[in-house]
Image (cartoon, grey):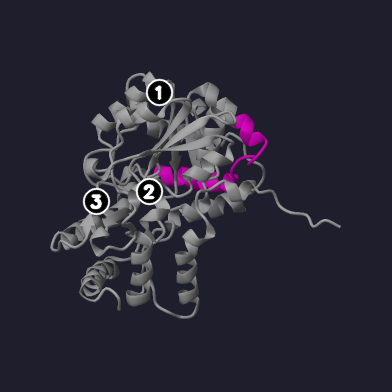
Amino acid sequence: MIKLQPSTRIKELTLLSANDWELLDEVRELKNSGQKITELTIGEHDIRTDPRILDALNKSAINGNTGYAPVSGNKNLREAIANRVSKRTGIPTTYKNVIITPGGQSALFAAHLGVCNPGDVALYCDPYYATYPGTIAGTGAKPKVIKARPEENFQLSGEAIDTASDGAKSLLINSPNNPTGVVYTRDTLEDISLACKKNNLWLISDEVYDTQVWEGTHISPRSIEGMSERTIVIGSMSKSHAMTGSRIGWAVAPEEFIDHLINFATHTTYGVPGFIQDAALHGLSLGKKFENEIATPFKHRRDLATQIFSKQNLLTLVPPTGAMYLLLDVSKTGLTGKQFSSLLLAKKHIAVMPGEIFGKSALGYVRIAMTVNDAEFKNALNEIIDFTKQFLQKPLE
């Protein structure tokens, strides 16, 4: 009898191999053995979901809201998101422009499936969130990368889009950006928008860090003239409201496109639990003040990092203007990001992410998540600098 084998498609979806994640496995093993590790790897808040949100979730479930919810999402939550978007972008938005999804990742997948036919080219920007290429490939589209240049502070240019756009159907951007911590300027977004119109591209805008802006303001490309009918905005409660485990997000797009995604959800995810949606609705009702409370610790840590790294010249910080991450140039050590991360873990018990996971533009960098308390964070940054000095003095030890 021939042994049954799984398909090869899942293995082929991503540019990453299991070896690219071995540092996280090593961290897990060290922690399980009782070793104290300062973990600056994953974008997980160092606080838990607010008790008021959990109380709303609990009450909803206890009161019987545990059956099937509308596939499109509860109307009251869709309306709340539409109102939030309208106020922040100035673009009229109704609940019919919104679908609720099981997290932002699900919305990204659905958006690409909705705009790309099998074999179509879908563009994305390097450095990128590590799952982007696999998400695109999973829809049957062909991921094609556009490099953002460190000398331009990783701002994406319209010229780069023009050069790569032959045969493309869509462009995926992320601002505030993971992993760079860069917020796209209005000039950048207008340049991107012009390129999308010129090359007839859908723009998929991942805006899950929209509340984490440390300098300037968050601008959604949907608010730029002529872009609302070709832009799909991805949002989530994960980062703005510390609800990562609740898995609830949304897509905002033209009404006809949302109908398209509702049809897809009917045959796949079948919606999001009602009690989770009620918790999200309560979270949104807490307003901007609450969102600022969630974001403020990261801004403070960003300020700490800027001060600490400005006092030395061995490591260079990409100027962080948003999001909960720092991208650190370690190239003066002569190490790759992977080598630096591995040695740092071994010598200092500090875990950071190798830049290589986020694309070729991040070679020679590491990403630092600002996700531990201030005192631990400050100590870790000083230890990273100390490790670098020690390595440069005795690189082979």
Q: Which residue is mark 2?
A: 360
Residue at image coords 50%, 76%: 32
Horizontal and vertical percent position of residue 86: 37, 28
Residue at image coords 25%, 35%: 185
Magenta run includes residue 263: yes
Horizontal and vertical percent position of residue 42: 41, 59
Q: Amino acid at mark 1?
A: Ser
**Cα–Cα gap, marks 3 and 1:** 31 Å
Residue at image coords 40%, 23%: 228
For discs 1 and 2, the disc positioned in front in the rendered view: 2
Q: Which residue is mark 3?
A: 318
Q: Earlier in the sequence, mark 1 or mark 2?
A: 1
Horizontal and vertical percent position of residue 219: 30, 33
**Cα–Cα gap, marks 2 and 3:** 16 Å
Task: Write the start and end of the magenta stretch as one range.
Answer: 262-285
For mark 1, give the secondary structure: loop
Q: Which residue is mark 1?
A: 228
Can residue 19 be seen at all in this image of the molecule?
A: yes
Dot 3 alpha-carbon crowd within 10 angstroms: few under 14, some 14 to 19, many 20 or more: some
Chief SS of the magenta region: helix
Magenta run includes residue 18: no
Relative horizontal placement of residue 333, taking residue 207 as reference (left or right) = left
Q: Amino acid at mark 3?
A: Val
Say if 268 sits above or below 196 in the image: below
Can residue 65 be seen at all in this image of the molecule?
A: no
Q: Residue furthest left?
A: 311
For discs 3 and 1, the disc positioned in front in the rendered view: 3
**Cα–Cα gap, marks 1 and 2:** 32 Å
